[in-house]
Amino acid sequence: MHNHQHHHNPDEPHVHHHQHTLQKKFRLALLVTFFVFLVELVGGYLTNSLMLLSDAAHMLLDVLSLLISWLAIYLSTRPATSSRTFGYHRAEVFAAFINGVSLIGVSGWIFYEAYQRYSSPEEIKVTALFVVACFGLVANLFILLKLHGHSHDNLNVRSAVLHVVGDTLSSVAVVVGGLIIYWTEWYPIDAILSFLIGGIILFGAFNVTREAVHILLENTPRNTDAHTVAKHIRDLAPVKDVHDMHIWSLCSNYRALSAHIVLDENTTLAQDQILEQINAVLQNQFNINHTTLQLEQIPCTQAGNLLCNAQHS
């Protein structure tokens, strides 16, 4: 006998409200970031500072990053359709991937320009540099304050926040560089701090890109081992065995599982109660909130194999 059961997250109205709030914050962050980009671009050109121009280039990518992330948040609220049965949840992961790759490109450009500038340092108009850098720092701190609380469990938001963190650190470096140049007139510090900015950006970008690829390849969510999940299910009294299990992430905070569950022939519990027990364990222990479970009293041909080794036809 087979019983196919689907379980989903009951908190959907709350999630939609949360997404709407996020969209409003992203709109504000987008406008502020674009204004800072314009100020830093003009300021970098007038002061002849590579630090400011590096920061302006990063800010331009931030504008694109926030735009992509905002679009991904909007798409994730769209309902499933007959051609997209999981909805648009993957849009946020794809956005994070694009943001991560673009940041890697920006860090490469900064390294190249910093090397050129270090080889032949140029004079910098330090007063204007310092004023523009302080403005950029305040603006970035404001954006960070708005978005920071949302970045813990959402890869897309985290990738966008990472752009802003990179910019905030860049602004701090530019302020410090401006002070050093003002007191010492040692112009190579402009290139040295640009290298530092590039390194910070590259480190964060690599982590976000790696995590996005992990999800896009349908890998098991981090800290969720299939054998450990299976053991927790088998430990339940009505369950005899688990096989043909798949665990994956639709996005950074939406985990899904499908499996065949072989029941103990002596169990007296109703199948609804068994499914309730299994889903409670999966949600509480592993934060898996979307399940498709097939209950079996006679094991099918896949029994004995926890994982299904699907072959390309």
Image: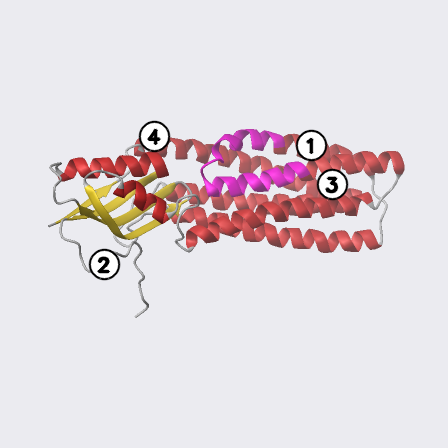
Mark 1 and mark 3: Cα distance apart in space: 11 Å
Mark 4, residues whose alpha carbon is within 10 Å: few (<14), some, or many (≥20)? few
At 33% across and 34% down in the image, what residue appears?
Answer: 284
- Residue 135 bears which disc, if any? 1
**Residue 134 magenta:** no
Q: Which residue is the site of mark 4? A: 14
Farthest residue toward the bottom? 313
> Is 21 left or right of 292, judged from the image as shown?
right
Q: Badges 3 and 2: C-beta atoms under 8 Å apart? A: no
Q: Nearer the viewer, residue 195 or 240?
A: 240
Which-is-in-front pick, marks 1 and 2?
A: 2
> Is 83 left or right of 202, judged from the image as shown?
left
What percent of the width, then of the height, locates residue 125?
83, 40
Q: Which residue is the site of mark 2? A: 302
Q: Which residue is the site of mark 3? A: 43
> Is 94 left or right of 183, judged from the image as shown?
left
Mark 4 and mark 1: Cα distance apart in space: 36 Å
At 31% across and 44% down in the image, what residue appears?
Answer: 231
At 78% across and 47% down in the image, what residue appears?
Answer: 191
Mark 4 and mark 3: Cα distance apart in space: 43 Å
Q: Please, is residue 257 above or below residue 181 in the view?
A: below
Identified by mark 4, the residue type is His
Farthest residue toward the front? 266
Q: Badges 4 and 1: C-beta atoms under 8 Å apart? A: no
Identified by mark 3, the residue type is Gly
Mark 1 and mark 2: Cα distance apart in space: 63 Å
**Residue 168 magenta:** yes
User: Disc 1 on helix, strand or loop?
Assistant: helix
